[in-house]
Amino acid sequence: MRGAGRSARRAGTVLALVAALAATACGTADDGNDSAEAARPIVFPSNRAAQAAACYAARLARTDATGGKPLSIDEVSEAAHYLLLGATEAGITEPNRANGLRDEGLALVDRIRASGQADSLLRQCQQAFAATRPGAFVALPADTPGARQQCYGLGFAIAQIAGNSPDVARDARLTGYLKMTAALDERVAADARASGTTAPELLLQDVKRGLARALEAGPVTTVLDACSQRYGGTDARG
């Protein structure tokens, strides 16, 4: 019993690769561009992965324009949402792929800021990535192993992203997300035992699938608030 729980935790901790996405708050743009290049407008890409990088950059550029204040949990989650959606293929989210998109996005931040395109690009981003739109979330699915995987994967990823960045404003909801993820750990392990999926690599794939489904459910913090209310025993906004 305890061994299976440890296996689930080991599988979950592999998602700590997502921690590199803390650059959402502290990454810096490429300073090597000359002024003409920096001012050249961005054309919204047609490729989904490139769109994700551009949307991430636009979100950062818009936040920078507010005066360099720390990112809120909503802001950091919105920026990360684009990257993680861009890193999702065939129903699985790959954090390493998101890291590459992050680097592409950071190289665009100065151009977007200089050209004043952040707001116009973000409007296109919400068209391209419907799950990021306000109001996209309807409700969590019924309480099943799949629903628990969704909340567990998304909670773990965002806790790593926000918790590892010194530039993210502390938010009481983050504590709720951490509590919810910890509470789900043993339940996810029990689900794995019941299904016969106890090998760490298989557990990891299940968590990545759950993360991918959660990302498509709606804005990240809206989904996590619902997860915390169901599985964490508290109202994450309260």
Image (cartoon, helix red, strand yellow):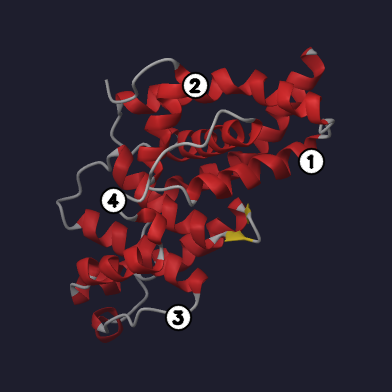
Depth check, front residue: 74 or 164:
74
Q: Which of pointers 1 and 4 lies earlier in the amino acid sequence?
A: 4
Question: Which amino acid type corresponds to the residue marked 4 in the rendered image?
Answer: Pro
Residue beneath disc 1? 202
* Quarter of the figure with residue 227: top left
Residue beneath disc 4? 134
Residue beneath disc 2? 231
Residue at x 36% of width, y 71% of height: 108
Mark 3 neighbour class, 10 Å CA radius: few under 14, some 14 to 19, many 20 or more: few
Residue lying furthest left = 67
| Marks 3 and 4, how far apart at CA | 23 Å
Residue at x 62% of width, y 40% of height: 15
Q: Position of residue 133 (x, y in %)?
A: 32, 55
Question: Which amino acid type corresponds to the residue marked 2 in the rendered image?
Answer: Tyr
| Marks 2 and 3, how far apart at CA | 38 Å
Q: Position of residue 191 (x, y in %)?
A: 72, 26
Question: Which amino acid type corresponds to the residue marked 3 in the rendered image?
Answer: Ser
Q: Which of pointers 3 and 1 lies earlier in the amino acid sequence?
A: 3
In this rendering, which labeled residue sits more in front, label 1 or label 4? 4
